[in-house]
Image (tube, grey):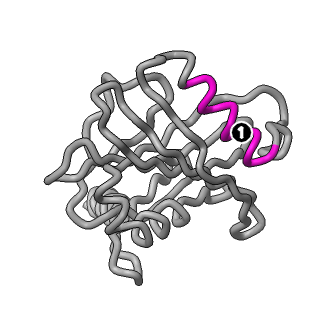
Amino acid sequence: MRYGFAIALLALALILSSCAIAANGFPTYIDLQDGYQFHYPNGWIQVDVQNASRGVDVVFRDLIEPTENLSVIISDIPGDRQLQDLGTATDVGYRFFKQRNAIDPNIKIELLGAETFSKIGQTYYLLEFAVTLSDKQHRHDLASITTHNQQLYTFNLSTTEQRWQSGKEQFQTIVRSFSINLK
């Protein structure tokens, strides 16, 4: 009887810890298994990623504008490489958009900004992109990137250019909230 109660309490604690409300009013997603957390906008919901591309760990979408989304992608990196071993924030940003433009020449990506910041001794790159889709739709993407335990963590938020103009500060706060919990 006590064992069953203990398991029920543990399960409840895990459920409650995966989605909490941050002090700034944004809900917080916590992934205890992969060791990361982030805030996400109110009104965005987690969607199924079973058929997603390799490495996609979680995806959230806006209920009203489903093209707006955020995701965490976890990729293996060889050896004991640190983020700085991949190049500067600008190097990584340029490499990403060149690779992406080569994959689909109908989508144009432009690197608007790249910076390095630290949080609790962990280095992150913050990248900002302007994206023009093949149907001429203009989008704005922000990404926070870091490495830990031979893995590259990429947190990406994508929104329409129109929503970017009105929600820029909110989106920047959310992308900067991404952090890995050093296990």
Identify the image quadrant of residue 82.
top right
In the image, residue 42 lies at what x, y percent?
Answer: 25, 67
Residue ID at (68%, 57%):
182
Assign the magenta stretch its main secondary structure.
helix
- Using the image as rendered, state which of residue 160 and residue 80 is in the foreground: 160
> In which quadrant is the C terminus drawn?
bottom right
Residue 149 shown in magenta: no
- Using the image as rendered, state which of residue 181 and residue 59 is in the foreground: 59
Q: Total marks drawn?
A: 1
User: Magenta span covers which residues?
Assistant: 88-100
Residue ID at (25%, 42%):
67
- Using the image as rendered, state which of residue 128 and residue 57 is in the foreground: 128
Residue 29 vertical position relative to residue 112 in the rendered view, above or below = below
Res 13 visible: no
Identify the image quadrant of residue 162.
bottom left
In the image, residue 73 lies at what x, y percent?
Answer: 51, 37
Res 26 visible: yes
Residue placed furthest toward the bottom: 23
- Using the image as rendered, state which of residue 169 and residue 60 is in the foreground: 169
In the image, residue 47 lies at what x, y percent?
Answer: 25, 41
- Residue on which the image places disc 1: 92
Residue 92 shown in magenta: yes
